Image (cartoon, rainbow, N blue to C red):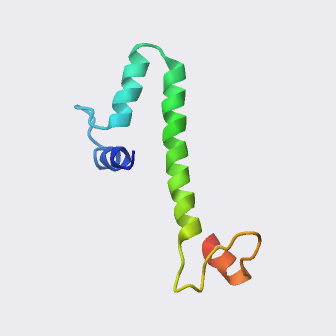
Amino acid sequence: MSLFVVWSEATFFSQSPVLSLFAVFIDLSKDNYNYLAIEVISTFTIAYLCICAYYTVFKIRVLNYYYLAGKHQTDEYSLIFAGM
């Protein structure tokens, strides 16, 4: 799935031959008037991107000083750093 996302981002501005895999899936669903498939593909793609982004945010540590800890154990400075 990550390769699909990277390939789609790399070929984002190519319009005449559609190279983005997500655009190809959406175009196939659009031609058949299958709006449920469009919603499912879009929701799955956005959910995957959100999971990857939030997983990275909660696993990042800066010199083991700024990090987000579980169970409300994060200090104020780490929260401010994560919010910026």
**Residue drawn at x 64%, y 73% as measured from the top left:** 68
Q: Is 61 above or below relative to 9?
A: below
**Residue drawn at x 38%, y 47% as measured from the top left:** 5
Closest to the observer, 60 or 82: 60
Is residue 72 toward the left or the right of residue 45 in the image? right
Say if residue 61 shows up in the picture.
yes
- On the image, the x and y values in percent for residue 29 come to 42, 20
Closest to the observer, 71 or 41: 71
Is residue 50 toward the left or the right of residue 70 in the image? left
- On the image, the x and y values in percent for residue 58 come to 59, 67
Image quarter (top left, top right, bottom left or bottom right) of the C terminus: bottom right
- On the image, the x and y values in percent for residue 59 come to 55, 69
Image quarter (top left, top right, bottom left or bottom right) of the N terminus: top left
Q: Is 51 above or below relative to 57?
A: above
Say if residue 84 shows up in the picture.
no
Quarter of image, res 24: top left
- On the image, the x and y values in percent for residue 73 come to 75, 76
